C-alpha cells in the first residue's frame, strides 16, 4: 500500500574511514539496457449510468530522456480511451496516480476509477484468495479518457540507460519526470487539443499541486485538478507545532461518531463535524496556544468538551495536556475492546496483542486491503490487459522512499499550496476539486481546508476551489457507497468545468 508520512524519516549520516591503500580510479558505471517503447491494446466495454462505453485499454511504456536526448527511464501506464471519438478536442484526458512517494497507481485504478474494480469487504478484512474483479459502474471513464501512470521505480517504471534513481526520487525531480511523460503522451497520441485534468491521491496531491504550475510554465494549461486525500504542506507536522492537534480533532469527532463512542451521539454527522471544526479553531486552539500557562480550571473545561467530541476519557485528555496524536487516538478509542483502528481508514479495526501500549502494532486499513489489490491487479494485468513482462511489478519502492529528496522551492520540505495558487493565477480558468474522507487519519480533512483557505487567492479565484466529503477514509473508493457518491461529484465537476470553459471561450 502506498506509504504516506507526515514527516519524512530523518536519515543518519554515515562517515566512512578512508583505506590506507592508494586511491583507485572509479570504474565507469554500466548502463542499464534500454528497452523499446511498447504498447498492448485490447478492446472492452463498460456500462456507466446506463450508457455503454466501448473503449480501448492500452498498457504500455514511454521513454524519458535527458537534455542530451539519451533515454534515462521508462514509465509504465495504462490508458483507457473511448472508441469512436473523431474530435479529440471534445474528449477530456485525465492523468491519474497514487502517492507514497514510491507507490504505483494500481490502487486508484482498481479501486473503481478505472473500468474494473476489486471486490472487497466494506470496512473490514476481505477473505483470502480467490479475489474477484468486476466492471466498475462508477468509473470516471464516462467523463474522460484515463491514463494511470506509475512513478519511476514503481510498477513497471524503472531507470534505464545512463539514468540514476536520484534523477527521479525527489519532489522536484518527480514533477519533472511526470511533466515529461505527460508531454510525450500528448504528443504521441495527438491529445494537445483535449481538455486536460490531473487526479492525484495522497502524495499524488503534492505532485499535482506542483505539477500544475510546472506544466503551465511548459505551455500546458490544465482545465482541472482533482485532489483526493491531500497533503499540501508538510511544515505543520514538525515537532513543536500545535496545529496538528487542531487539524485532527474534527476527524477524531467523525470517527468517534462512527463507533458510537460519544456521550451523546447526534443524528447528523455533517452538523457534528462542523461543531468540531468551530471548537477546534476556537476554544481548543486558544487553549493550546497558552501551553503550560493554561489554568487548571480551563484545562478541565476544555478536556470535558474534548470528551464530548472524541469520546476519550477526561482524565486521559488532561494527562495528555489536550494533545492527542493520531497514533494515540487510534489505540485509545477502542482500548476497552482490545482493538485499534486504521490510519488510512479508521473504519477498519483489529484486535491488538498489547492492550496497554500507546502504540499500534499495525494498520488494519493497510493489512486488510493490501493483498486483494496486489493479487487482483496482477491477475488483471496478465489476463484482461494481456500485458506480460519479465520484470516484477513493484507496488511500492522502498528504495525510492528512503532516498527521496524532500527539498522544494529552496525549502527543506514541500509546501505546494503556493504552486497550486500560482498555477491558478497564471491560468484563471483552472478549477480544483478537493475530495476528503471523514475517517482519514493520514491526511485529515481540516488540514486540507486550512491549507487551501490560505492560498492567498482573490475572491474570484477562490470560488474555483470546491470541497467534497465522504463517509470513508483515505482511499475513498474502499466504501462502495462513497465511490458512488464520489462518481456523482466528479460528474458535476467535469461538466461544470467544461461548460465554464466553453462559455468563456464563446464570450
Image (cartoon, rainbow, N blue to C red):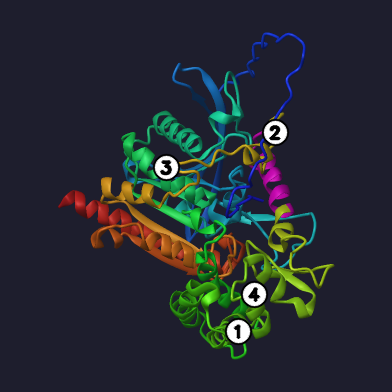
Secondary structure of the residue carrying numbered label 4: loop
Secondary structure of the residue carrying numbered label 3: helix
The residue beneath circle 1 is: 307
Is 425 drawn above or below residue 50 in the view shown? above
How far is disc 2 from disc 3 in space, using C-alphas?
33 Å
Mark nearest the camera among 2 and 1 is 2
The residue beneath circle 2 is: 14
Residue 385 visible in image: no
Residue 483 visible in image: yes
Along the line of sight, the residue nearer the viewer: 46 or 128: 128
Residue drawn at x 30%, y 61% as measured from the top left:
462
Which mark sits nearer the N-terminus, 4 or 3? 3
Mark 4 in CB contact with mark 3 (< 8 angstroms):
no
Q: Farthest residue in the front direction?
A: 293
The residue beneath circle 3 is: 211
Question: Percent x, y for residue 22?
Answer: 73, 8
Mark nearest the camera among 4 and 1 is 4
Residue drawn at x 65%, y 83% as measured from the top left:
261
Which mark sits nearer the N-terminus, 4 or 1? 1
Task: Give the main secondary structure, helix, strand or loop, of the magenta stretch.
Answer: helix
How far is disc 2 from disc 1 in space, using C-alphas?
46 Å
Residue 281 has which mark?
none
Which mark sits nearer the N-terminus, 2 or 3? 2
Judge from the rendering whether residue 458 lies leftward or rightward of residue 185; answer left or right.
left
The residue beneath circle 4 is: 320
Mark 4 in CB contact with mark 1 (< 8 angstroms):
no
Question: Percent x, y for residue 504?
Answer: 20, 52
Residue drawn at x 54%, y 58% as measured from the top left:
237
Is 272 drawn above or below residue 66 in the view shown? below
Which residue range is magenta in the image?
371-387
Question: Percent x, y for residue 309?
Answer: 56, 82
How far is disc 4 from disc 3 in space, using C-alphas?
40 Å
Amino acid at each position: 500500500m502506498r506509504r504516506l508520512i507526515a514527516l519524512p524519516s530523518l536519515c543518519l549520516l554515515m562517515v566512512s574511514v578512508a583505506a590506507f591503500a592508494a586511491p583507485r580510479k572509479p570504474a565507469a558505471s554500466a548502463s542499464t539496457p534500454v528497452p523499446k517503447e511498447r504498447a498492448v491494446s485490447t478492446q472492452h466495454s463498460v456500462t456507466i449510468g446506463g450508457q455503454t462505453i466501448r473503449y480501448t485499454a492500452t498498457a504500455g511504456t514511454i521513454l524519458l530522456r535527458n537534455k542530451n536526448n539519451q533515454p534515462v527511464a521508462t514509465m509504465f501506464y495504462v490508458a483507457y480511451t473511448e472508441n469512436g471519438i473523431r474530435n479529440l478536442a471534445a474528449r477530456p484526458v485525465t492523468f491519474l496516480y497514487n502517492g507514497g512517494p514510491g507507490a504505483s497507481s494500481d490502487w486508484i485504478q482498481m479501486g473503481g476509477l478505472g473500468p474494473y474494480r476489486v471486490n472487497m469487504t466494506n470496512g473490514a478484512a476481505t477473505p483470502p484468495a480467490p479475489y474477484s474483479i468486476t466492471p466498475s459502474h462508477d468509473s470516471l471513464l464516462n467523463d474522460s479518457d484515463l491514463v494511470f501512470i506509475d512513478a519511476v521505480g514503481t510498477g513497471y517504471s524503472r531507470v534505464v540507460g545512463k539514468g540514476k534513481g536520484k534523477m527521479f526520487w525527489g519532489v522536484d525531480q518527480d514533477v519533472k519526470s511526470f511533466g515529461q511523460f505527460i508531454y510525450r503522451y500528448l504528443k504521441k497520441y495527438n491529445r494537445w487539443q483535449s481538455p486536460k485534468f490531473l487526479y492525484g491521491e495522497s502524495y499524488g496531491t503534492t505532485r499535482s499541486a506542483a505539477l500544475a504550475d510546472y506544466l503551465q510554465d511548459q505551455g500546458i494549461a490544465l482545465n482541472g485538478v482533482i485532489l483526493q486525500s491531500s497533503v499540501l504542506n508538510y511544515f505543520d507536522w514538525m515537532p513543536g507545532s500545535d496545529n496538528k492537534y487542531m487539524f485532527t480533532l474534527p476527524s477524531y469527532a467523525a470517527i468517534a461518531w462512527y463507533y458510537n463512542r460519544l456521550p451523546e451521539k447526534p443524528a447528523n454527522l455533517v452538523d457534528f463535524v462542523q461543531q468540531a471544526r468551530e471548537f477546534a479553531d476556537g476554544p481548543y486552539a486558544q487553549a493550546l496556544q497558552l501551553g503550560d500557562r493554561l489554568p487548571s480550571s480551563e484545562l478541565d473545561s476544555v478536556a470535558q468538551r474534548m470528551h464530548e467530541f472524541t469520546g476519550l476519557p477526561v482524565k486521559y485528555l488532561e494527562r495528555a495536556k489536550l494533545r492527542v496524536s493520531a497514533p494515540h487516538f487510534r489505540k485509545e478509542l477502542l482500548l476497552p475492546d482490545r482493538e485499534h483502528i486504521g490510519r488510512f481508514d479508521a473504519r477498519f479495526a483489529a484486535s491488538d496483542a498489547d492492550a496497554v501500549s500507546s502504540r499500534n502494532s499495525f494498520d488494519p486499513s493497510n493489512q486488510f486491503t493490501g493483498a486483494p489489490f496486489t493479487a487482483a491487479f496482477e491477475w488483471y494485468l496478465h489476463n484482461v490487459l494481456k500485458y506480460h513482462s519479465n520484470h516484477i511489478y513493484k507496488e511500492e519502492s522502498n528504495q525510492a522512499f528512503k532516498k527521496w529528496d524532500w527539498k522544494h522551492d529552496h525549502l527543506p520540505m514541500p509546501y505546494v499550496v503556493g504552486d497550486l495558487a500560482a498555477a491558478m493565477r497564471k491560468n484563471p480558468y483552472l478549477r480544483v476539486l478537493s475530495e476528503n474522507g471523514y475517517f482519514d487519519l493520514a491526511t485529515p480533512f481540516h488540514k486540507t481546508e486550512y491549507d487551501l483557505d490560505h492560498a492567498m487567492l482573490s475572491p474570484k479565484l477562490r470560488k474555483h476551489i470546491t470541497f467534497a466529503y465522504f463517509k470513508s477514509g483515505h482511499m475513498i473508493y474502499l466504501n462502495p457507497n462513497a465511490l458512488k457518491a464520489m462518481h456523482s461529484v466528479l460528474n458535476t465537476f467535469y461538466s461544470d468545468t467544461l461548460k465554464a470553459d466553453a462559455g468563456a471561450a464563446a464570450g
